[in-house]
Image (cartoon, helix red, strand yellow):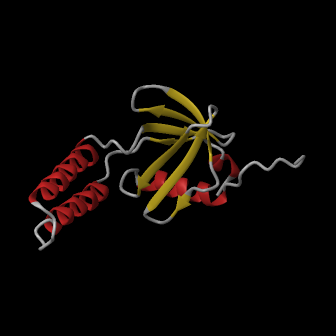
């Protein structure tokens, strides 16, 4: 990999994930089916749990409420320019606690006001080349070390 290609900003504009949608749908359907099992819960508690499952499904499947970041650009200096769902632009740094696998990336980011953002990216949310470049860059990334400490 050439150094110039590695140093280019990496633009991340994910689309909705079908895999994540079906995983969340299966979890909510399994939770619904668990209410059919014989339990010692009264009808009041079963209706309360059913209502909670429907609210969770609505916000997780329809509104995608767990993902607050719309898109990001990983700059050459190691920082991220984030665009949040509400349209706000934020500059953030990558935390060393991020996770990289071949099908899932969990980015832990922190902005200048010490607010933390967690961004879940599955392999079907980005095109193949962008996802591959992201994984390679994350595996080679090292946090800034302050030598004076």
Q: Is residue 138 left or right of residue 16?
A: right
- Residue 5: x and y in percent read 63, 48
Q: Quadrant of residue 69?
A: top left
Measuring 57% from the left and 56% from the top, which residue is drawn there?
Answer: 98
- Residue 131: x and y in percent read 47, 54
Asked if residue 94 is positioned above or below residue 34 in the image, the reply reads: above
- Residue 11: x and y in percent read 51, 40
- Residue 87: x and y in percent read 42, 26
Q: Is residue 71 left or right of residue 49?
A: right
Which residue lies most toward the right here?
A: 148
Q: Quadrant of residue 141?
A: bottom right
Asked if residue 23 is positioned above or below residue 119 in the image, the reply reads: below
Q: Is residue 128 left or right of residue 57?
A: right
Along the line of sight, the residue nearer the viewer: 95 or 42 = 42
Along the line of sight, the residue nearer the viewer: 55 or 60 = 55
Q: Is residue 123 left or right of residue 115?
A: left
Measuring 33% from the left and 41% from the top, which residue is drawn there?
Answer: 65
Asked if residue 92 is positioned above or below residue 94 in the image, the reply reads: above
Which residue lies most toward the bottom here?
A: 38
Measuring 16% from the left and 65% from the top, which residue is drawn there?
Answer: 41
Image label count: 0
Along the line of sight, the residue nearer the viewer: 134 or 81 = 81
Image quarter (top left, top right, bottom left or bottom right) of the N terminus:
bottom right
């Amino acid at each position: 990999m050439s150094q110039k290609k590695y140093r280019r900003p990496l633009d991340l504009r994910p689309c909705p994930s079908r895999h994540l949608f079906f995983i969340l749908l299966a979890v909510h359907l399994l939770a619904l089916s668990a209410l059919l099992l014989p339990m010692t819960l009264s009808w009041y508690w079963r209706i309360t749990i059913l209502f909670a499952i429907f609210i969770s499904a609505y916000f997780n499947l329809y509104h995608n409420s767990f993902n607050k970041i719309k898109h990001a650009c990983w700059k050459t200096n190691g920082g991220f320019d984030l665009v949040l769902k509400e349209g706000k632009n934020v500059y953030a740094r990558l935390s060393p606690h991020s996770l990289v696998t071949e099908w899932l990336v969990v980015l832990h980011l922190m902005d200048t006001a010490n607010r933390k953002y967690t961004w879940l990216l599955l392999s079907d949310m980005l095109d193949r080349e962008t996802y591959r470049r992201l994984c390679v860059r994350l595996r080679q990334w090292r946090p800034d070390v302050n030598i004076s400490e």
